[in-house]
Image (spheres, rainbow, N blue to C red):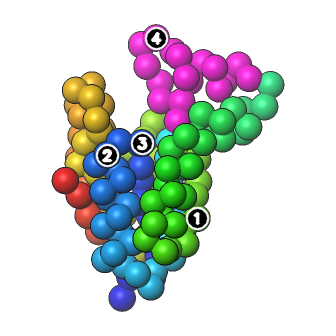
Amino acid sequence: MVSRVLVAVDGSEVAEQALRYALDAHPDAEVTVLTVVGVPSAMFGEATAIALSEDPDRSIEEHAEPVLERVRAVAAECDAEVTTEAAAGHPARTILDRAGAYDVVVVGSHGGSLADRLFVGNVAESVVRHSPVPVTVVR
């Protein structure tokens, strides 16, 4: 029986579908929704802003808030309760670092834009390959 589910979201439509799937497939489970911000990039944008802020934890929360706000709205629509978490770093590594504490990880197959699809698709693939627990990939 699945009692703890980790759902990784990135603000994309596919991630929202993954959350809806997790809530529907595991109605009695404790669901934690994780979003990862501050992804290192060639332009150093979000990661640099977080690293240089006076309060990095607050900066992480601020960057994650739009995604987590939508997560809470989806949970309310599904009449479900979720725990939300925001972290900074590389998405696959961050998800994998937490995966062992859950019975299953649910991820979307890809993000919204072409760049997101390439990057997030790689995240899903990496999580599937290295997770210590089963992974459900939602398309």
Nearer the observer: mark 3 or 1; the answer is: 3
**Residue 45: where, in percent of width, then height?**
53, 16
Among the two numbered marks 2 and 4 on one chain, the one whose residue lies closer to the N terminus: 2
Residue lying farthest to the bottom in this orientation: 1
Among the two numbered marks 3 and 4 on one chain, the one whose residue lies closer to the N terminus: 3
- Amino acid type at image mark 3: Gly
Per the rendering, the mark at residue 83 is 1
Q: From mark 2 to mark 4, how far is it between C-alphas?
A: 25 Å
Crowding at dot 4, Cα within 10 Å, few <14 / some 14-19 / many 20+, comes out as few
Which residue is at the front of the view, 27 or 34? 27
Q: At 63% from the left edge and 20% from the top edge, which residue is drawn?
A: 49
Among the two numbered marks 2 and 1 on one chain, the one whose residue lies closer to the N terminus: 2
The secondary structure type at the circle numbered 4 is loop
The secondary structure type at the circle numbered 1 is strand
Q: Is residue 107 visible?
A: no
Q: What range is drawn magenta here?
A: 37-53
Per the rendering, the mark at residue 27 is none
